[in-house]
Image (cartoon, rainbow, N blue to C red):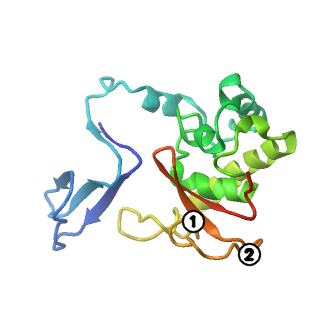
Amino acid sequence: MALFSDGTVLRFHPRDEQRPQKHQLLIEFEDGTAISASVQMYGGLWCFRDGEFQNPYYDAARCKPSPLSDEFDMAYFDRLITSSDAQKLSAKAFLATEQRIPGLGNGVLQDILYKAGIHPKRRIGTLADNERNTLFHSVKSTLKEMTEQRGRDTTRDLFGRPGGYRTRLSQNTLDKPCPICGGTIVKQPYMGGSIYFCDGCQRM
């Protein structure tokens, strides 16, 4: 079994296409096609026999409900967000660490928080009931939209095609005016990565 984590870029290469010079994995098939994998800033590649691999993040992602499923409802989300551990965290830390919500990482949380009007650094414990409800619906609707449109426009699929979802907060919109309030889209380092936010819509 092969496992690829977030941050690993997979590409399919037709028979006569030149292979990338830099890669961490290259699998060539008998028909002359190939698949390459390259790690960007972070990522992981594993190959193991079924049942051998043990990783708490991987196991948590497999046993928890997907945010796209019916199991991931308001009652489930409310249990997550009102736990004593969550109350101490920032919005970014709550959404994107410890695999609380499988598949939700730093790249997609930017638009989720933007649509909910919540600053990435804001503590979860300061959110009112209506803000928690708004955040839940933003998680569900944003991820559904991204999935239906084959990913974000900042990433590419196996065949090198960009996703159809137009990101509101990313390197593509940095320093541009917010379409809602006219504020500026800002980028800051935070928690070992970067956060994007609107300085008008997402106030601390």
Residue 13 higher or lower than 72, as above or below: below
Q: Is residue 22 visible?
A: yes
Looking at the rendering, in which quadrant would you find the N terminus?
A: top left
Q: Nearer the viewer, residue 160 or 49?
A: 160
The 10 Å Cα crowd at callout 2, few under 14, some 14 to 19, many 20 or more, is few
69 sits left or right of 133 in the view: left
The 10 Å Cα crowd at callout 1, few under 14, some 14 to 19, many 20 or more, is some
The percent position of residue 2, horizontal first and vertical second, equals 29, 40
Residue 1 higher or lower than 35, as above or below: above
Q: Disc 1 designates what residue?
A: 149
The earlier-in-sequence mark between 2 and 1 is 1
What residue appears at the point 36 percent right and 62 percent down from the top-left corner? 158
Residue type, numbered disc 2: Gly
Q: Nearer the viewer, residue 72 or 196?
A: 196
* CA distance separating discs 2 and 1: 26 Å
The percent position of residue 127, horizontal first and vertical second, equals 79, 41
What residue appears at the point 23 percent right and 69 percent down from the top-left corner? 14
Residue 74 higher or lower than 37, as above or below: above
Q: Nearer the viewer, residue 1 or 151?
A: 151
Q: Disc 2 designates what residue?
A: 182
Q: Is residue 144 visible?
A: no
What residue appears at the point 72 percent right and 32 percent down from the top-left corner? 76
Say which element carries label 2: loop
Residue 108 higher or lower than 174, as above or below: above
Within the image, what quadrant is residue 53 found in?
top left
User: Marks 2 and 1: which is nearer the front?
Assistant: 2
168 sits left or right of 203 in the view: left
What residue appears at the point 52 percent right and 55 percent down from the top-left corner? 107
Residue type, numbered disc 1: Gln
The percent position of residue 125, horizontal first and vertical second, equals 75, 34
